[in-house]
Image (cartoon, coloured by chain):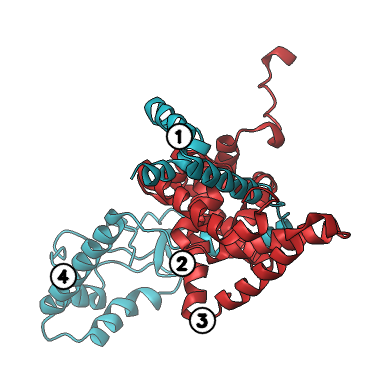
Chain colours: A cyan, B red
Amino acid sequence: MKCHEARRLFGAFWDDETTQAEREWLDAHFVSCGGCRTEYENFARTVEAVSALPRYDAAPELLDRTLARTRRAAPAHDALPQRRPAWVAATAAAAALVVGTALVIQWVGMGHVTPSDDRTVAATPMQTAPLGAPVLASAPVADTHTAAVADSVFDHSDDIEFVLDPVTLKRGRAALTHPGPDQIRSEQAVVSF
Amino acid sequence: MPSDRDPAPPPILSLSDEDLMARVAEDEERAFAELVRRYQGRITNLVSRVLNDRECADDLAQEVFVRVYVHRRNYRRGSKLSTWLFTIAVNLAKNEIRRRVRRRNWFSLDALQEVLQDSAMIFADPREGTERAMEREQLQEAIGRAIGTVPEKYRVALVLRDIEGMAYEEIAVVLNVPGGTVRSRINRARNMLKRKLQPMLRRDGTE
């Protein structure tokens, strides 16, 4: 039993990892046990032989090969999709909800008027107006259609008098090009649609 | 004015391992190249000895450094870089051992016995050795093969200790086992090797 315990301590004894008590006990055991002393000599010779093994050097091309691989790996790593902040998705969902709701309300509010009718009525007086030619807001055609078609959930037909001249229609946006003549009696407005 | 200028950054070569790794984490390729230069020898040697396969060790060492690069931002500053590197290397080597065992592509015990017997005949009487260098080389090859026959968990501890010279505490971190287990594994591995190598290492008059 003493020899078994002694041999269990060989490794730590060699590495000087034993406690002081273990070291003293083993030293005393070696004095009295020739078998363990010989075993320890063989043990030490083995460890020395292993420790004396020559070291393998890295292959000369290891560095270049490794760098080549990491260069190929770098774009993929950096291209990993980044998570968008949560507020982006929430804002997009809210915007979609608002737009959808507005479209539904508008569709319901238009009643029997078809979209094609609306487009024709709204566009005809403005886009066909000769540029530079005065068109009064009280013209019968414009008034009739403005009153007949509700272009939003609110009816502004009584509040706003549209004056389309002098304006330039360009890309769906009307803008004042020059001061209006004196004979125009109404307020001027710029209409965006 | 020169006194107002920021001090020049220290050259790569003089950086500590941890500072070097911080530069690697910032995608500085020169820092990564220096890291590979510093550790390629130790990693290759470790893997070679654990696997007893020099050829495969190159590929595995390369894989170690690629993984270091891929996970460069996971390195925790304050922990020892060499411990982290050796942990990766040991894990890859263990995986390779298990893969080989699964594929039955492993060094056979019979072949080891032949090598040991040949070596024992050569080294039993050193006076007859006229080609000492070759004999020594064969002995070293036999020791390497004998290490390869030690069960994996004992072998890795043995290589880390006796070939890489790591402290017990660091081995415990690399292997993620208690210090007492490290001590036990190293001792068992050495005793296994002693039994295998005793015929070769016997000297006249010792037995």
Q: Which residue is mark 3?
A: B104
Q: Inspect the image, locate mark 3, and give the three-letter code of the amino acid beneath it.
A: Arg
Q: Chain of mark 2?
A: A
Q: Is residue B78 left or right of residue A2?
A: right
Q: Foreground mark, 4 or 1?
A: 1
Q: Chain of mark 4?
A: A
Distance from label 4 to label 2 (Cα)?
39 Å
Question: Residue at 51% of width from left, 41% of height from top?
Answer: A34
The x and y percentages for residue B194 are 55, 55
Q: Nearer the viewer, residue B176 or A88?
A: B176
Quarter location, residue B138: bottom right
Same-chain check, marks 3 and 2:
no
Q: Earlier in the sequence, mark 4 or mark 2?
A: 4
Q: Foreground mark, 1 or 2?
A: 1
Element marked by disc 4? helix
Q: Earlier in the sequence, mark 1 or mark 2?
A: 1
Residue B98 position (above or below residue B153): below
Q: Which residue is mark 1?
A: A32
